Image: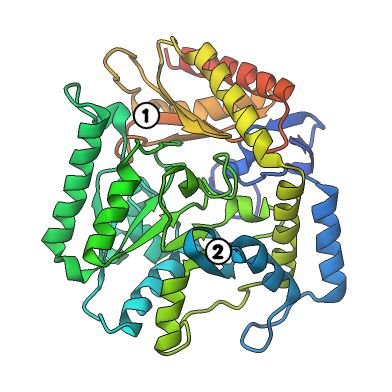
């Protein structure tokens, strides 16, 4: 057994020795298609020469400088690329080393903003059930992943409360239209503002497209427009977590571009650096920054490795490649093909209840019975079986359990790199289909 603490202490995972393009290679030399980009991270695949060269060049010039003393060129240039054109009013960036750190920073920035503008009574956050905002205690408090929260529940902050996600597959009533369902969700959010006291709420936090916990769940039309209106009416901020769904994953650089609104604070990570270096960050609206400038003039938060020169150089190269090679065009084209092939393969599958997603970010929800939406017994660990069967067939995917409530339900995510080709999409769906069928057959 390994001396390294892995996610499972009962079984060591296989070693990945190298990566090239959309493939990973293990000890046996076998090529595994990285059909989920890890956890929707490897947006450019593996070993991209331009990103590798940028890392080496930065290492040769400056490996580290503490941000209490210096800035660095790569961080300044990355911020210029991301918010120099003020998308949706976002004018400033702050960089850290993970999505969890980014969500922590967003929570603290939002609280401090209201101190700066003279509203210290704002101490509450509203987020959503079956969401995920990270594994640090603040981010875990914000998240609604019941399974991940449970062991640490006594340590989590009571400043966070949770409302329903936009999950029409299971939560929309048969007698409701999409518009009526959205209206019900917005009424629930408004009621939570009123329960807490509207002038006590700092922000509403949500994943623009829900990631691993709920499996690529997109919002229905009008939902985020309604959310934005409620936040504005009560003077609260809107924080959108796009750690998984952002930076091109859904076909636009920011997933919120497809919702008709923009946030006050946005969290980014995975697709920001593509896994070439650990990096995350927050993008902040100009009016929030102005509140700080008129107040203390300083954000009371920081990390030793924030705006790390090498991480920022890698992310800058990733974003330049995405833009210059027009990879978002490929995300949209290959995303449409992936959706088409998934519908063809699973649209009438007796054990697939829902196929959902956007861009190159898709999931299937697995069920015991399609007609009744009955789930598989969680003890069967169907999601783990899918992962093993896929790996045996040369595909890495991202299955999860607890889709419905943290305990029941299974789904699996496919999120291939933005460089994926049509032939590779065909191979991904073929191997994934075979893996799902074999896993279900093993459940009896």
Q: How many marks?
A: 2
- Nearer the N terminus, badge 1 or badge 2? 2
Q: CA distance from mark 1 to mark 2?
A: 49 Å
The residue that label 1 is drawn on is: 379
Which scheme is used to colour this image of the protein? rainbow
Judge whether 160 appears above or below 380 on screen.
Answer: below
Tell me if residue 123 can be seen: yes
Name the spot of residue 68 as percent of width and height, x first.
Answer: 61, 87
Q: Nearer the viewer, mark 1 or mark 2?
A: 2
Q: Is 101 left or right of 325, judged from the image as shown?
A: left
Q: Is 409 left or right of 413, judged from the image as shown?
A: left
- Kindly identify the residue that appears in the image at 84 percent across and 52 percent down: 50
Bin the neighbour count of mark 1 within 10 Å (Cα to Cα): few under 14, some 14-19, many 20 and up.
few
Extreme residue toward the left, this view: 195
Front residue (pair 225, 193):
225
Bin the neighbour count of mark 2 within 10 Å (Cα to Cα): few under 14, some 14-19, many 20 and up.
some
> Do the numbered discs 1 and 2 sit on residues whose CB atoms are within 8 Å?
no
Front residue (pair 247, 28):
247
Give the quadrant of the C terminus.
Answer: top left
Q: Secondary structure at mark 1?
A: helix
Judge whether 149 appears above or below 119 on screen.
Answer: above
Name the spot of residue 233 as percent of width and height, x first.
Answer: 23, 61
- Kindly identify the residue that appears in the image at 61 percent across and 33 percent down: 332
Front residue (pair 162, 421):
421
Q: Which mark is residue 86?
A: 2
Judge whether 209 appears above or below 409 on screen.
Answer: below
Name the spot of residue 384 as percent of width and height, x first.
Answer: 50, 31
- Kindly identify the residue that appears in the image at 35 percent across and 17 percent down: 368
Judge whether 362 appears above or below 367 on screen.
Answer: below
Tell me if residue 14 can be seen: no
Q: Secondary structure at mark 2?
A: loop
């Amino acid at each position: 057994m390994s001396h390294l603490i892995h996610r499972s202490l009962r079984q060591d995972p296989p070693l990945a020795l190298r990566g090239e393009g959309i493939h990973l290679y293990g000890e046996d030399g076998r090529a595994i298609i990285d059909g989920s980009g890890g956890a929707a991270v490897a947006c450019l695949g593996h070993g991209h020469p331009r990103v590798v060269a940028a890392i080496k060049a930065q290492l040769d010039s400056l490996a580290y400088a503490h941000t209490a003393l210096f800035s660095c060129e790569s961080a300044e240039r990355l911020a210029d690329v991301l918010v120099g054109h003020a998308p949706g009013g976002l004018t400033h960036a702050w960089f850290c080393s993970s999505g969890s750190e980014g969500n922590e920073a967003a929570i603290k920035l939002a609280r401090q903003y209201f101190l700066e503008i003279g509203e210290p009574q704002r101490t509450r956050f509203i987020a959503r059930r079956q969401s995920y905002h990270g594994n640090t205690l603040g981010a875990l408090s914000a998240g609604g992943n019941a399974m991940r929260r449970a062991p640490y529940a006594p340590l989590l902050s009571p400043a966070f409360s949770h409302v329903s996600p936009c999950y029409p597959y299971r939560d929309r009533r048969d007698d409701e239209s999409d518009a009526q369902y959205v209206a019900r969700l917005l009424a629930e959010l408004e009621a939570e503002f009123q329960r807490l006291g509207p002038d006590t709420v700092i922000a509403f936090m949500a994943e623009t497209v829900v990631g691993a916990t709920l499996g690529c769940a997109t919002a229905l039309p009008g939902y985020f427009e309604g959310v934005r209106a409620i936040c504005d009416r009560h003077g609260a901020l809107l924080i959108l977590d796009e750690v998984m769904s952002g930076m091109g994953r859904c076909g636009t650089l920011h997933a919120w571009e497809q919702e008709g609104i923009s946030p006050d604070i946005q969290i980014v990570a995975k697709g920001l650096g593509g896994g070439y270096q650990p990096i995350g960050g927050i993008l902040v609206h100009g009016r929030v920054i102005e509140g700080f400038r008129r107040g203390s003039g300083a954000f009371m938060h920081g990390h030793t490795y924030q705006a790390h020169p090498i991480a920022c150089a890698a992310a800058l190269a990733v974003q330049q490649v995405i833009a210059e090679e027009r990879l978002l065009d490929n995300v949209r084209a290959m995303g449409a093909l992936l959706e088409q092939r998934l519908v063809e393969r699973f649209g009438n599958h007796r054990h697939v209840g829902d196929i959902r997603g956007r861009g190159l970010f898709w999931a299937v929800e697995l069920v015991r019975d399609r007609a009744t939406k009955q789930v598989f017994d969680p003890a069967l660990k169907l999601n783990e079986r899918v992962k093993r069967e896929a790996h045996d067939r040369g595909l890495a995917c991202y299955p999860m359990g607890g889709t419905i409530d943290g305990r029941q339900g299974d789904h699996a995510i496919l999120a291939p790199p933005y460089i994926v080709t049509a032939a590779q999409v065909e191979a991904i769906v073929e191997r994934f289909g075979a893996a799902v069928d074999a896993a279900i057959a093993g459940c009896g």
